[in-house]
Amino acid sequence: MYDISVKKNIEWKAFWLHDPIFKKQPVIQPVDAKRSKYLRTEVQNRHTLFRKEFEIKNIPIKSAKLYITADDCYKAYINGKFLAYGPAQALAFAYNYNAFEIKKLLKPGLNTLSFHVFYQGMLNMALISADNLNGMICMLEIEYKDGNVQRISSDHTFKCYPLMAYSSDKVYGYETQFAENIDLNLFPYGWNQTGYQDCDWITPFISAIPYPMSYTLVPQITPTVSFSISYPVEIIKKKKGNYLLDFGQEICGNTVITAKGKKGHVITIWHAEELTEDNKSARYNMRCNCDYEETITLSGKEKDKAEFFDFKGFRYIEVFNYPGKLTKKSIYVHHRHYPIPKNHSKTQSDNSLFQRIWEMCEKGIIEGTQESYLDCPTREKGAFLGDGLVTGLAHLAYTNDSRIMKKFLYDCMHSARLCPGLFCTTVTYDASQIIDYSLVFPVMLNKYFEYTEDISTLKDSLNVLEGIIAYYAQFYRPEGILGHIKHVHREQYTVLVDWPAVYRDGYSDEITKGPNCFGNLAYIGILKESAKVYSYTGNELRAEELSKKAKQLEKAVINAFYDNETGLFNITKTSDIHNFHDAVFALYFDLELPKGKKPLLDYIKRRGIVCGVYFTYYYFSVLYNHKEYDKIFDLIVSDEKNSWKTMLNTGATTCIEAWHPDDKKNCSFCHPWSSTPMIFNDIFFGISSYGTGYKVLQFKPRIPKQFNKGTYTKPTPLSDITVSFERKDKKIIYNVTLKKACRMYVCLSDKEEGYFADASVGEHKFIQITD
């Protein structure tokens, strides 16, 4: 990859270029909770090519930095070689640009910069669009070793070409993406190569200097997504021209197909996450509300090549009417995901089921982490806050890359400009709001700070936290609890509890529209987690004020919803229904209860997993805090219907949206919010920061008794670490291997005192005496 970080914002000496069709289109901000074709802009599904040729001196280059962004998005090429896809979606007042070091891609003489820019024009969770903001800006600064500097900037010397080869009115998901019926007769082959004849291309429209007032450009915190080529692992010829391809697992990417056939010959392509019931065809009309059927019309050239622009999530492809013999080289996928370091976490367990579950979750967070933490790469492609909590923590443990979590948090902060209570997805114009997802923001802030000790991000968040607190405070009732929580744009699901609805354990839409226990517990969580943020920033006065507010609400909630006979909570003031999620939240946020915590803890242990996949993070966290390590492991490898084993039994290769696809009629087969086992494998092996910011490494293993032998390798800010263990004769023998020396805190069990040690590079042995 060619990405470089930008520590100081640059001064743009370039012009913003538009497709001329946008010259008379007014800029709008379509904030709405509906995803409807009636909210599309007049211009939609618009592909535009931009290019410029320029001379490079025959002098050694010291550096060649390219800065680029586009709206909605771009694919960049240097001398015909693909460079990157970007930017990560953002609102215009904090719009991302990307930076690259490209000196290795340049050559003396004539060179070419070229960009494929796409404007979608629909309101959804995948792209910031339907606003008539379109175009691109770039600046290439070349510093030669002789000290001379050359700048190539987007301006009137660029050429542009409205590309009509990608056309369709068909839409997938919830207004998520257009189908791409590619007509190669309309595709300008060689357009990104040096020497291409662009004399019939037009001059782009330039609207402002250096870019429209709608934008404030900022360097993207994260690198662009990485790409690699994936080939099918199996090709089955069903009949002439009809092939079924299996890529072995769910992947996310853009399909490329090459073929030689007559001009006008039409190939049909299906993408699918699973096979039909008879296991003979790709189920292109997918559960997740995506009807992945598209066509490619050949131009009759010696070798036609079609590449889909937008990405999909799928495992299978079925091809119809393919001319000649289809081979692995005829069709492949540009597999895309957030960059994964080579030293990512790895685990080996003597429990084969747990190993398979971990690997399924691993694949899920790889495919589902793109420019942000996506719910799925198919139906919505939305960065939901609830998904971000679980996916974010699993991804951080897997990669030691905190940049994407930082970006996610700033995306949340930016959405607060449009809604102080925060949208439940970020960043987007889709204006849905959920109090339990607003809660995720301060929870993730604290997790992020404890890992990085990035105090500036916490300080930047304080006004946003105050906005969230004030927004929900308007729903207080005279008796001191929150009543009907309303949101600005939408009535439905203001208190979600869990999803899909079958996992809400007694809650209904009607119940959540009135005073209810769960919404109040979520607000207690917001107050307590925000107090913790203030404490980390050194503002103990505000932390104490928020803690007092939380305590007042806690007393009012107990008065309104607590069942003194059972020690459990009722879901409403007039109901005698007890709820699993209420019990978990009351324990997670450490409420002081008249009958103590035992009735609630016994209740959630007895009931097992009655919640959805996402909520298991809170459930297992409570069990861990009460030293129920074996119970967590039993639940992870459970044979019950609500289990990760059920996912595996359905044929899932990445963790899915629900315990079973039939639990949700539009279930997606890649949904990394179900990757909780990765988080708790990390916790079992006990590698974490002692205090905040990884100044001291903590080794605090809590290995469930069902594990007899295992190994876990993990990158951390201090050192890459490998922990292996084996049970022998009422002992657990640990070997901890460090690649760098560091200060270490060791605590092998809950029954012994921990101690500090200066750990050198190499292997260290620890022995725990068990009962």
Image (cartoon, rainbow, N blue to C red):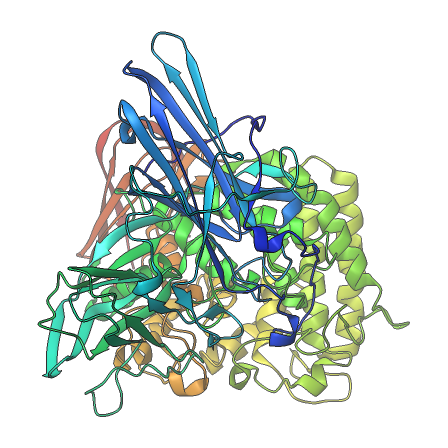
Asked if residue 111 is positioned above or below residue 376 in the image, the reply reads: above
Count of marks, rendered view:
0
Q: Is residue 347 visible?
A: no
Rendered residue at 84%/68% (across/down)? 476
Position of the C terminus by quadrant:
bottom left
Instruction: Answer left or right for 390 relative to 598.
Output: left
Q: Is residue 230 visible?
A: yes
Rendered residue at 30%/28% (across/down)? 110
Name the residue nearer the viewer: 75 or 287: 75
Q: Quadrant of residue 746?
A: top left
Name the residue nearer the viewer: 227 or 137: 137
Residue 454, image x and y in percent?
Answer: 56, 35
Instruction: Answer left or right for 610 relative to 645.
Output: right
Position of the N terminus by quadrant:
top left
Residue 700, image x and y in percent?
Answer: 38, 47
Residue 690, image x and y in percent?
Answer: 46, 39
Asked if residue 68 is positioned above or below residue 252 in the image, the reply reads: above
Q: Quadrant of residue 211?
A: top right
Residue that sits furthest to the top in the current view:
146
Instruction: Answer left or right for 476 relative to 113.
Output: right
Residue 26, image x and y in percent?
Answer: 71, 56
Name the residue nearer the viewer: 574 or 526: 526
Name the residue nearer the viewer: 230 or 626: 230
Residue that sits furthest to the right in the current view:
478
